[in-house]
Image (cartoon, grey):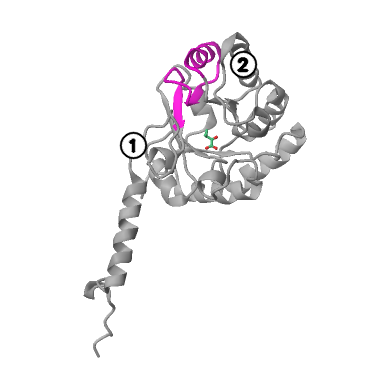
Amino acid sequence: MAEAVRRITAVDIAKRKNGERIVALTAYHAHTAGIVDRYCDFILVGDSLGMVMHGLETTVPVTLDMMILQGRAVMRGSKRALVVVDMPFGSYEENPEQAFRNGARVLKETGAGAIKLEGGKHMAETVAFLVRRGVPVMGHVGLTPQAVNTMGGFRVQGHGEEGQKLLEDDARTIADAGAFAIVMEGIVEPVARAVTQSIAAPTIGIGASPACDGQILVLEDMLGLSDWTPKFVKKFGALRDQIEAAVSAYADEVRAGTFPGPEHVYEPKKR
Ligand code: KIV
């Protein structure tokens, strides 16, 4: 009989502060989740799916139903890694009750082990409310893409003394409120290091230097599938070129009549 696999929990991730580095990637589909699951400690069903899968310009239009649909797919495709589902813009900011109602819906309807929400100090009360009621929360500070319209674009955070202080306050209050880990996105190196050294929760960097307790990237970016590569991304693959070559070879063969070949054709049964 196959051995039962125990899923990594939010508590396991929290215990990794100052320990073995935490490895994470995003996934939105069952098949990619199945691969990521074998190598990562947690899989984020990020609201970046709006931009990556749906061609939206920002994550702002992403809905709770979109997140739940892909969260279920990722849960079906994985068995070992903790699955964290992003709360989309507008689904948690109003008050702690709204956040609990929608966070509970995500956990119930996907089976995921945690949710992630963006925001610093102003979200601390909500984080504490959720955690006290059984919803594990991952924080997300620094460059928070859902705030693109108030930030005036996707801007690296933590510049200057004031920027550093704001970020330190944000991360500390979210950690003190009970977040089991905090994504730090687009943050200058010395600030990412100072925050990581000063808070109890593990920090997960994306464009925030190697000083963090772990790293996350958007899968399609590191596979070389996205058409734009930010500075902080290393391409570990060249999937865009490989897909293009495969699609072009398929089109050529169909046009030339060489695909399907005899080996792809069904023969009638011999009587
Ligand atoms: O939505 C997402 O993919 C994210 C990562 C960039 C951390 O929040």
Q: Amino acid at mark 1?
A: Phe
189 up-or-down from 207: above or below: above
Residue 203 located within the stretch drawn in magenta: yes
Per the rendered image, the range of residues in magenta is 188-216
Relative to 182, 19 lies left or right? left
The residue under label 2 is 172
State the separation of the CA atoms marked 1 and 2. Answer: 33 Å
Where residue 36 sits in the image (x, y, percent)? 40, 41
Using the rendered image of the protein, determine whether residue 80 is visible from the camera's viewpoint.
Answer: no
Extreme residue in the top direction: 161
Q: Is residue 106 shown left or right of residue 255?
A: right
Name the residue located 43 percent from the left edge and 29 percent from the top edge.
231
Q: What residue is rendered at 28% in x and 85% in y?
A: 268
Rendering coords of residue 121 (x, y %): 68, 20
Q: Could you tell me if residue 28 is visible in this image?
A: yes
> Is disc 2 surrounded by few (<14), some (14 to 19) or many (20+) residues within 10 Å?
many
Quarter residue 20 falls in: top left
Q: In the rendered view, does 212 fall on the left or right side of 164?
A: left
* Mark 2 C-beta closer than 8 Å to ligand 1: no
User: Residue at horizontal 54%, vertical 41%?
Assistant: 48
Q: Nearer the viewer, mark 1 or mark 2?
A: 1
Q: Position of residue 162 (x, y in %)?
A: 63, 11
Q: Which residue in the protein does label 1 denote?
A: 236
Q: Residue at x 65, y 23 (%)?
A: 120
What amino acid is found at the position of numbered circle 2 in the picture?
Arg
Task: Choose between 12 and 179: the one closer to the eye.
Answer: 179
**Which is more toward the observer, 239 or 44?**
239
Choose between 121 and 73: the one closer to the eye: 121
Q: Residues within 10 Å of mark 1 (few under 14, many from 20)?
A: few
- Seen from the viewer's position, the closer of residues 238 and 96 is 238
Q: Is residue 224 magenta?
A: no
Q: Quadrant of the C terminus?
A: bottom left
